[in-house]
Amino acid sequence: MSYIKSRIRSFGYAINGIFFLFRTQANAQIHLLAVVLITALGLWLGLSGTEWCLITLCMGLVIALEAVNTAIEQVVDLASPEHHPLAGKAKDVAAGAVLLSVIFCAVVWGIIFLPKF
């Protein structure tokens, strides 16, 4: 029974992390707004099942990478409270990963949405 309780606690920690992400990170809030707008646009345009799969995958990728970026920033700030060039590089690369995901997802969204207009 303790295994089940520990799994339930793990879900609670994950949910706390998600709330922390959207409560404290401006970029995550912007991405969440984009998810809402893209979902509304997709509903309005009547996307196919395959298109929804691609759109959802892209949205999940961006949000998940934003969460990983936030986790990396938190750990780097803990490990290196003073400015250190390597700490800055780690944070820059993590932020760059989010940006790359947004760029590639924008291409996918463009391929799906633009022909519908």
Image (cartoon, rainbow, N blue to C red):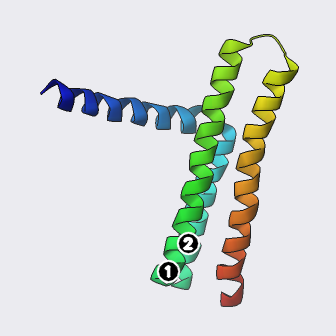
Q: Quadrant of the N terminus?
A: top left
Give the image quarter of residue 109: bottom right
Residue 27 found in image quarter: top right
In the displayed structure, 60 sits above or below 23; it is: below
Residue 87: give x, y in percent of width and height. Answer: 79, 22
Residue at the image position 63 percent from the left and 21 percent from the top: 75
Tag 2 secondary structure? helix
| Cβ atoms at labels 2 and 1 below 8 Å apart | yes
How crowded is the residue under tag 2: few (<14 C-alpha within 10 Å), some, or many (20+)? Answer: some
Residue nearest the viewer, comparing 74 with 16: 74
Establish if 107 lies above or below 67: below
Q: Residue at x 76, y 51 (%)?
A: 99
Amino acid under disc 2:
Leu
Of the 4 image quadrants, the one containing the C terminus is: bottom right
**Left or right placement of residue 92 versus residue 3 in this view:** right
- Disc 1 marks a residue whose amino acid type is Thr
Q: Which residue is mark 1?
A: 50
User: In which quadrant of the rendered view does residue 45 lie?
Assistant: bottom right
Instruction: Name the one closer to the observer, 33 or 18.
Output: 18
The answer to which of 110 and 84 lies nearer the viewer is 84
Of all residues, the one furthest to the top in this rendering is 82
Q: Which residue does the image show at 43% across and 31% down from the upper left?
A: 16
How far apart are the two marked residues, 2 and 1, measured between alpha carbons? 6 Å
Determine the residue positioned at 26% across, 33% down.
8
Residue 17 image offset from top left, x and y in percent: 48, 32
Checking the image for residue 54, the label placed there is: 2
Q: Is residue 22 above or below residue 55?
A: above
Mark 1 residue element: helix
Percent x, y for residue 3? 20, 28
x, y percent for residue 79: 68, 13
